[in-house]
Image (cartoon, coloured by chain):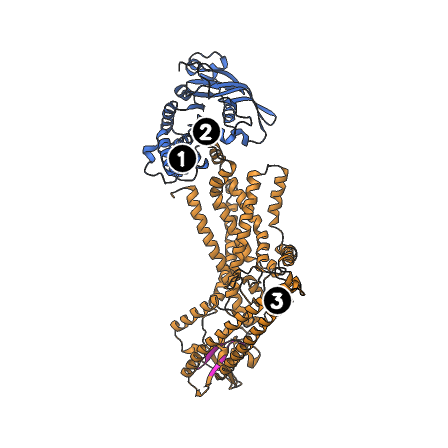
Chain colours: A orange, B blue
């Protein structure tokens, strides 16, 4: 028995158990997210239930559970048609079922507004065209798609005009700010130009409206399961399909199409449907910018601390302080970022470079620059600690070897020490990136928004708009899970967004880990 | 070996009354030693006697130690290496060093050899190529590695790595090479090769070697200095020191009665 304790058998068991517990918790989290997230886009069959009371229910079966009384089960249906019923979901006791079927004609419509519609096609109507077959719907949608493209061309032209107008307005603001009296003539000239553009603008808007109105005549009428008719404009319909007639392959294609849509489309229905592209873009760009700031800052600070600062009480205090920075709640960083970057530096920039726009702030409000700087501040201790450790782990012999050959301290650092420390530094960067990707609280007050009108990187000069607000997957999760008007309908999107965020972190980390392994190989053994 | 220390041609390095302190504790007491050109001088003595410390004074490696302080004069040619007239970079280029533990950089063999030249700003490819061949031949390593110059130096054996470090040191063409127990981490075969190499290098370079190994000191050196507790006890021709030591301490140490 004594031997048993001396060999530390229980301790070994305890270590194993602790690891297992940790892994199980993490695995459970990932599995829950994967199971719920991956299934969201798979087209489910539409079940038609006739109840004993005579009324009928059509929808996707979402879940089933035991009834409160403990007898039998009840099923939750997603019945959609929010515009008709007000609710997307309905619980039905299985005991009330009269008949269950999978009608082939049942159709799912994904719409721009009001969520899904479940029902049957009644008729299709276009100028000089009337039919009731699903082929007709197909033709209608094709025509509408072509017309929509024409509409988009108008939109682009209008956007272009808007940009030109706002540029002129901005020039006017500058002149006005400078001296309204002296620049009177120039301002008047600008006014005339704006006026000309405005005329063009109105002309374009009229034509666009005409085209849009024409599109209004392309409609399709559907009926819900209880016979209520609903006529919809074709432009409202994003996608339609009859899941009960589709085989696995067709469903697979639809699944893929929806996944692609997730990656490239903008969100709709207050973010609960549609794609996540702006949020994905914002997240990746935020992490990238954060790394750009925190990586050099952290490495350089650590180099000073380890290589140049004289070891003593001061350095030790700084080191303790840096380590403790990691323990400060991230919201505190957020508040600091808001006060220091946004209101301090941002307002300063506005006063110096954009005085003509005041009181409308340019940089003096939350934006991706300030958010990434705040996150950089948050993650810089991680980089410092990792770099310091990596530099400290290099044997003194290497340092002395370089100095003994007549190198300066700086040459040794750049040519030998930093390359040798690079795998360790990369580890720090990976940790920093993972930490930054998961932060939401500081972003909420430094520039993240529910819906950003434009990306922080686009085709208009100067291409990189660091003052713009942005969308973020982490904030997106919070937003649709807790701030959405229809939480139940948004639930699938929460899982999908979570899964995506985890995937992005995983992807960025694997790239970094791959790089680190390459460096490790290069600086420890093997060939070049 | 027919030359008395301090006699004949001017010494390369002339240390005069060197005191050395680590903080408040004195590690070297009034050491005066001069090293004749193109000869091998061995520094021997028990652990902690200050021989490595003294060696590291000669290229100012002790500058790196916090609280280290040197007194006295160490002349390289006729310049005091601790004075402002001597640039430490220049000093280390003229006085090369090989360490106890081989310390190749995680670079290719080629880059390792030319490291000293690169940091000195040499860019010409032909010069570098020539330096690599010359140095590796000088370190008796050329035949073994000439086909894999671009491979990592970390893939070499311990003995090869130490000879690479010697090649690296001679690539910058120093006047003096300091060796701090260069064979203590090597097997007998590699040790023999390095010793052989020292014998060849003495034709072109002044070598100062610290060693714990009496036989090695006897084999490779022309002169031997025996240090004990920070003091220079005896200095003279290796033959004399080993055959007829004047000092009792020296005799006891050489015959293995302590140390």
Q: Crowding near pointer 2: few (<14 within 10 Å), some, many (20+)?
A: many
Specify start and end residues of the magenta stretch as a single range: A103-120
Q: Taking B179 as reference, is A160 above or below it?
A: below
Q: Is residue B18 left or right of residue B186?
A: right
Foreground disc of the pair 2, 3 = 3
Numbered circle sitting on residue B113: 1
Q: Taking B258 as reference, is B110 above or below it?
A: below
Reply yes or no: does residue A109 show up in magenta: yes
Q: Mark 1 lies on which chain?
A: B
In which image quadrant can residue A344 be found?
Answer: bottom right
Q: Whole-Å distance between the Cαs marked 3 and 1? A: 70 Å
Whichever of callouts 1 and 2 sits on the residue coming sooner in the sequence is 2
Q: Is residue A197 left or right of residue A405?
A: right
- Who is closer to the viewer here, B245 or A62? B245
Contact between marks 1 and 2 (CB within 8 A): the answer is no
Position of the C terminus of chain A by quadrant: top left
> Does residue B180 appear anywhere in the picture?
no
- Who is closer to the viewer here, A67 or B218? B218
Q: Is residue B104 left or right of residue A313?
A: left
Numbered circle sitting on residue A186: 3
In which image quadrant can residue B177 be found?
Answer: top left
| Residue picked out by circle 2 | B97
Percent x, y for residue B88?
A: 52, 30
Q: Residue at horizontal 51%, vertical 57%?
A: A26
Q: The residue tagged with tag 1: helix, strand or loop?
A: helix
Q: Mark 2 lies on which chain?
A: B
Q: Is residue B177 left or right of residue A306?
A: left
Q: Residue at horizontal 43%, vertical 42%?
A: A524
């Amino acid at each position: 028995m004594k031997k048993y304790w001396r060999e530390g058998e229980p301790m070994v068991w305890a270590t194993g158990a602790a690891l297992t517990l940790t892994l199980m918790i993490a695995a459970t989290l990932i599995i829950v997210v994967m199971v719920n997230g991956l299934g969201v886009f798979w087209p489910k069959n539409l079940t038609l239930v006739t109840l004993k009371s005579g009324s009928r229910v059509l929808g996707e079966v979402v879940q089933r559970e035991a009834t409160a009384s403990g007898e039998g089960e009840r099923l939750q249906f997603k019945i959609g048609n929010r515009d008709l019923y007000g609710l997307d979901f309905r619980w039905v006791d299985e005991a009330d079922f009269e008949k269950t079927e999978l009608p082939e004609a049942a159709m799912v419509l994904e719409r721009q507004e009001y969520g899904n519609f479940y029902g049957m096609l009644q008729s299709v109507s276009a100028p000089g065209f009337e039919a009731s077959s699903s082929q007709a719907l197909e033709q209608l949608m094709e025509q509408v798609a072509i017309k929509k493209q024409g509409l988009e061309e108008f939109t682009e032209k209008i956007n272009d005009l808007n940009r030109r107008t706002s540029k002129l307005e901005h020039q006017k603001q500058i002149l006005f700010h400078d001296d309204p009296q002296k620049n009177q003539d120039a301002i008047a000239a600008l006014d005339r130009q704006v006026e000309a553009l405005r005329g063009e603008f109105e002309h374009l808007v009229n034509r666009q409206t005409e085209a849009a109105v024409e599109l209004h005549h392309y409609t399709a009428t559907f009926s819900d399961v209880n016979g209520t008719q609903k006529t919809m404009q074709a432009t409202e319909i994003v996608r339609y399909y009859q899941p009960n007639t589709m085989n696995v392959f067709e469903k697979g294609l639809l699944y893929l199409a929806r996944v692609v849509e997730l990656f490239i489309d903008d969100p709709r229905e207050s973010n609960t449907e549609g794609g996540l592209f702006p949020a994905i873009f914002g997240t990746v760009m935020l992490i990238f910018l954060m790394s750009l700031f925190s990586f050099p800052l952290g490495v350089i600070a650590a180099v000073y601390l380890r290589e140049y600062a004289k070891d003593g009480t001061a350095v030790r205090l700084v080191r303790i302080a840096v380590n403790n920075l990691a323990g400060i709640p991230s919201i505190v960083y957020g508040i600091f970022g808001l006060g220091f970057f946004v209101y301090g530096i941002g307002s300063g920039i506005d006063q110096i470079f954009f005085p003509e726009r005041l009181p409308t702030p340019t940089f003096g409000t939350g934006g991706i620059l300030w958010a990434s700087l705040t996150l950089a501040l948050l993650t810089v201790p991680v980089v410092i600690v990792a770099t310091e450790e990596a530099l400290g782990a290099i044997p003194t012999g290497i340092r002395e070897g370089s100095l003994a050959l007549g190198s300066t301290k700086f040459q040794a650092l750049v040519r030998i020490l930093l390359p040798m420390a690079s795998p360790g530094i990369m580890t720090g960067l990976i940790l920093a990136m993972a930490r930054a990707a998961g932060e939401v609280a500081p972003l909420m007050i430094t520039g993240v928004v529910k819906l950003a009108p434009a990306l922080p990187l686009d085709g208009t000069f100067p291409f990189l708009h660091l003052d713009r607000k942005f969308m973020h997957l982490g904030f997106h999760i919070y937003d649709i899970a807790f701030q959405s008007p229809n939480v139940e309908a948004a639930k699938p999107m929460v899982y999908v967004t979570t899964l995506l965020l985890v995937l992005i972190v995983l992807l960025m980390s694997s790239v970094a880990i791959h790089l680190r392994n390459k460096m490790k190989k290069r600086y420890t053994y093997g060939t070049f | 070996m027919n030359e008395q220390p301090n006699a004949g041609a001017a010494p390369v390095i002339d240390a005069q009354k060197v005191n050395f302190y680590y903080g408040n504790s004195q590690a070297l007491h009034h050491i005066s030693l001069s090293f004749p050109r193109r000869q091998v001088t061995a520094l021997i003595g028990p652990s902690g006697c200050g021989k490595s410390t003294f060696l590291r004074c000669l290229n100012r490696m002790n500058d790196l130690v916090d609280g280290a302080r040197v007194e006295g004069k160490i002349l390289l040619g006729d310049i005091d290496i601790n004075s402002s007239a001597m640039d430490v970079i220049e000093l280390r280029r003229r006085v090369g060093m090989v360490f106890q533990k081989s310390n190749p950089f995680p670079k290719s063999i080629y880059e390792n050899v030319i490291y000293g030249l690169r940091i000195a700003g040499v860019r010409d490819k032909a010069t570098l190529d020539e330096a690599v061949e010359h140095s590796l031949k000088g370190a008796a390593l050329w035949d073994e590695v000439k086909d894999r110059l671009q491979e990592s130096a970390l893939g070499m054996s311990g003995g090869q790595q130490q000879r690479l470090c010697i090649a690296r040191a001679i690539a910058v063409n120093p006047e003096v090479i300091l060796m701090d127990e260069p064979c203590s981490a090597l097997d007998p075969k590699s040790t023999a090769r390095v010793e052989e190499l020292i014998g060849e290098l003495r034709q072109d370079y002044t070598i100062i070697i610290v060693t714990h190994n009496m036989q090695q000191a006897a084999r490779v050196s022309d002169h031997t200095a025996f240090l004990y507790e920070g003091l220079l006890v005896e200095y003279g021709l290796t033959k004399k020191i080993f055959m007829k030591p004047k000092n009792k301490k020296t005799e006891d140490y050489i015959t293995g009665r302590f140390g």
